Amino acid sequence: MIANRQLLLLTLLLIFTLISVLFSLLSGSVEISLGQLVSNFSSAENNLSRQVLEEIRIPRTLAAFVTGGLLSLSGVIMQVLLRNPLADPYILGISGGAAVGALSAILLGVSGFWLSNAAFGGAGISILLVFGIANKFGSWSVTRLLLTGVVVSAGWGAVINILLTTSSTNNVQSMLFWLMGDLSQSQVGVGHFLLLLIGLAGGLVLSRSLNVLIRGELLAVSLGISIRPLRLLLFFSASAFTATAVTIAGSVGFVGLIIPHMLRLLGARDHRMLIPCSILLGGSFLVFADSLARTLIAPQQLPVGVVTAVIGVPAFILILRSTIRK
């Protein structure tokens, strides 16, 4: 019975992923029908719709799916690592470090490759800073890691405010779009998909250990699980996924927080099911949200983080009410 429900859930998520991708490819300022979409893939004719698909919509859809999948996967790992249902990918200050790196690059007038590398470098500094402080005396506790992340995040927030208040008007809009999450200039490559696949495979391999660890460290130790190496692996894996996602799309909120909770309410509590379902639902959710961001006030575009917040806040309230009732 449980296996049938999980198979049904996985099938529904695959259908939702297909629908969200089609919606993303067909929606926008340039109208493209389903017939034109099929013909563009089957013919070599170079027309406007083909250019729009190949240069804008397909890359943006792929970037949205990879970003959503990485954030959801990181959210699952963070909630196990910190044993905190409110944990999300940004709780340890990684997005703050990436934001400082990206905003500094915008101030210097660079974009594209250099902006992405600056964001990733800032995220890397934040990861090392949190790890170094939390592990300074050779002992690691969930409380120390969480408090260190909160403090580092607050410090990055102060630096971000300084950069915003001292920037020229021309740079502020670009900075705000990046801080709210923006996929308009995002590109993903084979390496991004490979990282997502490695995360999926590694999560499935460690799924039994995650099922035990989320129930408490004493139980995990009694069952022969090495806590410290597992913690280190989870910390650096979740940090790498978050840093990559932030580098692609900026700070997109609520994806890593609400997706794992939503799936647990739907019955996917076993991490062998939760991890692949999180990647599918997180990726398709962000693809759908980005499609709305492009079309709600077209030809203008909204930052995708605004749309995820508008959807995520009421969704999280409903999830919270359902959890309290149970």
Image: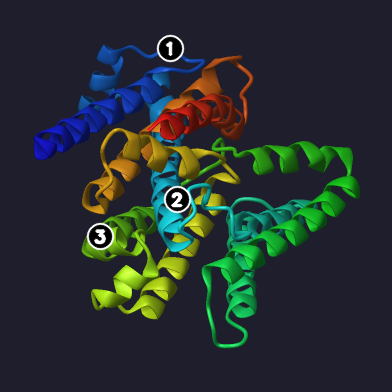
Q: Is mark 3 on a helix, strand or loop?
A: helix
Q: In the drawing, does residue 26 fall left or right of residue 92?
A: left
Label disc, if present, on residue 75 of the rendered structure? 2
Q: Position of residue 63 (x, y in %)?
A: 44, 42
Cα distance between the residues tagged 3 and 1: 44 Å
Is residue 175 or residue 132 the one in the foreground? 132
For the view shown, which residue lies furthest in the bottom direction? 138
Cα distance between the residues tagged 1 and 2: 36 Å
Q: Is mark 1 on a helix, strand or loop?
A: loop
Disc 3 and disc 1 in contact, CB within 8 angstroms: no
Q: Which of the marked residues, 1 or 2, is nearer the chain's N terminus?
A: 1
Q: Which of the marked residues, 3 or 2, is nearer the chain's N terminus?
A: 2
Label disc, if present, on residue 31 of the rendered structure? 1
Q: Give the residue type that dot 1 points to.
A: Glu
Cα distance between the residues tagged 3 and 2: 15 Å
- The quarter of the image holding the C terminus is top left
Disc 1 and disc 2 in contact, CB within 8 angstroms: no
From the viewer's perspective, is residue 91 above or below residue 30? Answer: below
Is residue 276 or residue 80 the one in the foreground? 80
| Disc 3 target residue | 207
Quarter of the figure with residue 277: top left
